[in-house]
Amino acid sequence: MLIEIAPPRFDVDLDLRYASADNLTAAPIYARSLCLLHADAVAPLGRAIALARGLGLRLRLFDGFRPVEAQWLLWRALPDPRYIADPRRGSNHSRGTALDLTLADGAGRPLAMGTGFDDMTELSHHGRADLDPEAQRNRALLAGVMAGAGWLSYPYEWWHYQLAGAEGYPLLTDSVSGGKMMAK
Ligand SMILES: [Zn+2]
């Protein structure tokens, strides 16, 4: 079951890039700005929100559930399995068990992370010692908040986190949203 992630139930900021043209395909992929996650992600997300709040920070979400149809659009735009999961194997986003996000300050201003979301270069990998120290510190903050809340990181993308056992969940098409996410 998928749950909508939005205020006021969830104290997060939404910046859903695939619902706008501000993404690697330069066109909207989703027809609606909608962030859904598997029900099993609700508790870990709540823990991350609380941990960030304790630091005077907020979670800013870029993407959650991504219908299989959308994964095909991304794969056709960038068929590089380091950054985009082959839709035939499936993305954990298409299982509702992965989340792309960054941290923002208390006023909602995103923290510097050294690259933007979906940068898809080696600069987006974890463990970079050649970034501005502030960006390294901010990435470490995000990683600490998410690890402390029970999420797992992904080596090539500082913004991507997923549930333990994420691959064990079924792949889902847009039919689970009633067909609301994908443009017809
Ligand atoms: Zn992701």
Image (cartoon, grey):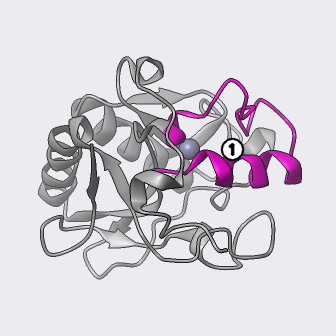
Q: Position of residue 31 (x, y in %)?
A: 58, 76
Q: Residue at label 1?
A: 124
Q: Quadrant of ligand 1?
A: top right
Q: What is the quadrant of residue 146 in the picture?
A: top left
Depth check: give the residue in front, 81 or 2.
2
Disc 1 secondary structure class: helix
Residue occupying image coordinates x 78% and y 63%? 24
Across and down, in percent, residue 80 comes to: 85, 36
Residue 125 quadrant: top right
Q: Quadrant of the N terminus?
A: top left
Q: Which residues are magenta?
A: 65-94
Residue 8 seen in render = yes
Direction from residue 31 to residue 88 in the image, left or right: right
Q: Residues within 10 Å of mark 1 (few under 14, many from 20)?
A: many
Q: Is residue 64 visible?
A: no
Question: Closest to the observer: 131 or 17?
Answer: 17
User: Depth check: 35 or 180 in front?
Assistant: 180
Residue that appears at 22% across and 35% down: 40
Residue sitting at 33 percent across and 31 percent down?
Answer: 151
In the rendered structure, the answer to whether residue 129 lies left or right of residue 7 reads: right
Image location (x, y in percent) of residue 68: 62, 45
Residue 83 on the magenta segment: yes
Placement of 19 over or under 47, stated as above or below: below
Q: Quick check: is 182 in the magenta stretch?
A: no
Residue located at (34% from left, 48% from top):
37
Q: Quadrant of the C terminus?
A: bottom right
Q: Is residue 98 above or below residue 150?
A: below
Residue toward you, 58 or 183: 183
